[in-house]
Image: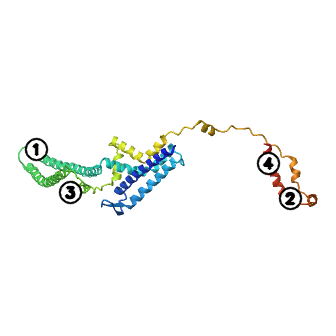
Amino acid sequence: MGIIVRSLFVLAVVLLGIVSMWTTYTSLHDSILPEPTVGIPLPNGVVWQCSVMALGMSVAIGIMLFALKVAVIQGEKRLSIPGVAGMTIVAFISIAFNLDVLYRTADRDFFLRYSNDRMRSVYEEFLSKATADLSKKKTGLLQDIAKQQGELAAEVKGLRRAPSGYGNLAKNEDYKLTVLEKTAQVELDAVDAALSTKEKADVILRGTPPATLDEVDAMQGQLRVECKDLASASGVRLPDVVRLENPLFAVFAKLFDWHTVGFKEIFLMIIAFLMDLGDIIGYALVPNRQKRQDEREYDAPLPKRALRPLPAPSDNLLPILEPSTPQEHEDEGGKDGDEESFPMPAENIAPLAASAARRQRLRIW
């Protein structure tokens, strides 16, 4: 691959790496690592409250992915399907942060709407259950009163033990009815009062939707005040305070809700994936340069040659390396007159013989 193509890929890696680092920092700052912060003055007079831990982690993840991508482009690492899967696992943290920021950027009211809906669903479920229990209780009281009224009417008509008329048994049933109505009326008044508080809670829920997270907390406080009497009258436990989730977990809760996942969620997941690995995937799709004919011939494997057995070492080399006696050296020195010869130690003969044999075999080969 030419230097121009490699340079373009390196430029793409740098730009996408910077964007990925910024999305990672934004997600960490908003969700997991908001503190500690350091004020950094900007040229326009604004002081940027920089989260130290979020910035350090985002830069570290970006540099790690950048090093892996450069290693792939330089040919130091082999890019294959297992390699892409491994890089995806390594880059999953950054991809998750990319997805968080992209989703909240595409739908800026998502987290506010998600928090409001989650809080409302908890109190709506409580109001529904408490209202059902109060209605059941009120119905039971009215049934008891109606039953006693029926007992009295039956006794007056003579449908029971005594003959018709307002006798002693009818007076006894009338007494029971009077006591029951008085006692049941107290409970009915309490039920009606509790149901009236339910109507006040419904007015709060049907009001103007909150515009900020602080307004969501304020609405929850108002609902708890109105629902306190309803909980005591119905016997249904008041729900715990709904704590707002951080944006990262809210986004993933939305994405893994298969009933609400649509085209937007799938599209943003693909974009978040390509922000970290799109350049490497593009690099893998570029075809290799076609080799010229002379390069193919040069790279072709050499034909195999049959090996011939090595000949035995020649015997005429051994006399040369046989040890000599000092007398022979004296004779040779007497003949030459000018050169001085020394005897060869016996322990050096074996290595020299093996070396000479190897040279002889190579010469024959």
Q: Which amino acid type is shown beneath numbered disc 3?
A: Gln
**Badge 4 local density, few (<14 within 10 Å), some, or many (20+)?**
few
Mark in front: 3 vs 1: 3
Could you tell me the amino acid type at mark 1?
Ala
Residue placed under numbered mark 3 in the picture: 222
Residue 207 rendering spot, x and y as whole percentages: 18, 50
Provide the secondary structure element on which disc 2 rests: helix
Of the numbered discs 1 and 4, the one sitting upstream in the chain is: 1
Using the image, tell me which numbered label, if any, was put on residue 243: none
User: Which of labels 2 and 4 is toward the front?
Assistant: 4
Which quarter of the image is occupied by the C terminus?
Answer: top right
Q: Contact (CB < 8 A) between labels 2 and 4? A: no
Nearest the viewer among 110 and 201 is 110
Q: Which mark is residue 359?
A: 4
**Image position of 71 (left or right of 113):** right
Q: Earlier in the sequence, mark 3 or mark 4?
A: 3
Q: CA distance from mark 2 to mark 3?
A: 110 Å
Residue drawn at (65%, 39%) of the image: 301
Q: Which residue is mark 2?
A: 346
The residue where tag 1 is placed is 154
